[in-house]
Image: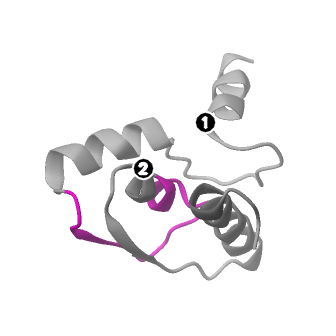
């Protein structure tokens, strides 16, 4: 039960199930230790988009790919909300 509670805090409501979940807090720590602001980050399997959202919050440029349409749609919506404050 504790794992589910933690996941609810890491992602916006309605996130799809994903086998490899990375929270934005972990991603931000990784980015902070390996990149500088305005660096470019490539995430070739971006899944739900937590790395991309971490890039936005840490002032990094990003490029992400995702083959799963459900994950892509969720990631796109989350990134749009993060950048624009609303879904575009």
Q: Quick check: 16 above or below 39?
A: above
Q: Which mark is residue 10?
A: 1
In terms of sequence position, does the residue under pointer 1 or pointer 2 come before the other?
A: 1
Under tag 2, what secondary structure?
A: helix
In this orientation, which residue lies closer to the viewer: 6 or 28?
Answer: 28
Q: Quadrant of residue 18?
A: bottom right
Image coordinates of residue 60 in percent, x first then y, are 31, 62
Where does label 2 land, which residue?
57
| 18 lies left or right of 60 | right
Quadrant in the picture for residue 75: bottom right
Image quadrant holding the C terminus, namely bottom right
Magenta stretch containing residue 43, yes or no? yes
Residue 24 locus on image (x, y percent): 48, 43
* Residue occupying the point 49% across, 46% down: 22
Circle 2 residues within 10 Å: few <14, some 14–19, many ≥20 = few
Q: Position of residue 16 (x, y in %)?
A: 77, 55
> 17 or 40, which lies in front?
40
Segment tinted magenta in the rendering: 37-53
Circle 1 SS class:
helix
Q: CA distance from mark 1 to mark 2?
A: 14 Å
> Going by the image, does 27 lie left or right of 83?
left
* Disc number lying in front (1 or 2): 2
Residue 88 sits inside the magenta stretch: no
For the residue carrying disc 1, how many other residues have a C-alpha within 10 Å: few (<14), some (14-19), or many (20+)? some
85 vs 87: above or below: above
| Residue 67 in the figure: left or right of residue 40 | right
């Amino acid at each position: 039960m504790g794992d589910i509670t933690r996941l609810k805090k890491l992602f916006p409501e309605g996130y799809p199930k994903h086998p490899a979940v990375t929270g934005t807090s972990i991603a931000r720590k990784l980015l902070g230790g390996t990149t500088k602001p305005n660096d470019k980050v490539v995430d070739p399997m971006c899944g739900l988009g937590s790395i991309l959202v971490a890039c936005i919050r840490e002032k990094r440029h990003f490029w992400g790919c995702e083959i799963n349409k459900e994950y892509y749609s969720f990631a796109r919506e989350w990134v749009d909300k993060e950048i624009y404050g609303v879904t575009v």
